[in-house]
Amino acid sequence: MSGRTHTRACPERTCLGCRERAAKSDLLRIVLSGEQCVPDHRGTLPGRGAYVHPAPVCLDSAIRRRAFPRAFRVKGPLDTAALRRDIEDSSRSAAEDGG
């Protein structure tokens, strides 16, 4: 035996906000478009990706820690307004569906 398991392993990524490891499917992929962080819901946009839980608290933590410029290996602040709108809209709609 080679030591490999026969079950498919679920890929894990680390959230930039809370630094917890989670299944790739539970996190939102973020890519850089110019100087703007944009959400990549389908995971098909080109370029380096960074991952964050789709929750405002994780996004705020990642912004406060300046994690996005480090993850994308760029200097200076990045525009996260579109990303914030997307996460707030998705969390708002999830709260309406659940309540």
Image: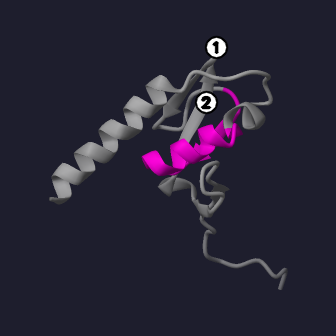
Quadrant location, the C terminus = bottom left
- Extreme residue in the right direction: 2
27 is within the stretch colored magenta: no
Residue under numbered circle 2: 31
Front one among 19 and 63:
63
Q: Position of residue 34 (x, y in %)?
A: 64, 14
Residue 54 seen in the figure: no
How many other residues sit within 10 Å of disc 2, few (<14), some (14-19) or many (≥20)? many
Picture quarter containing residue 2? bottom right
Q: Is residue 96 above or below residue 88?
A: below
- Extreme residue in the front direction: 64
Distance of label 2 from label 1 (alpha carbons): 10 Å
Front one among 8 and 94:
94
Q: Position of residue 62 (x, y in %)?
A: 61, 43
Q: What's the amino acid at mark 2? A: Val
Where disc 1 sits, the SS reads loop
Instruction: Tell me how the rendering is colored.
Output: one colour
Segment tinted magenta in the rendering: 47-67
Residue sitting at x 61%, y 38%: 63
Residue sitting at x 69%, y 37%: 66
Residue sitting at x 79%, y 22%: 75
Residue sitting at x 64%, y 48%: 16
Picture quarter containing residue 82? top left
Q: What's the amino acid at mark 1? A: Gly
How many other residues sit within 10 Å of disc 1, few (<14), some (14-19) or many (≥20)? few
Q: Position of residue 56 (x, y in %)?
A: 44, 45
* Residue 34's disc number: 1
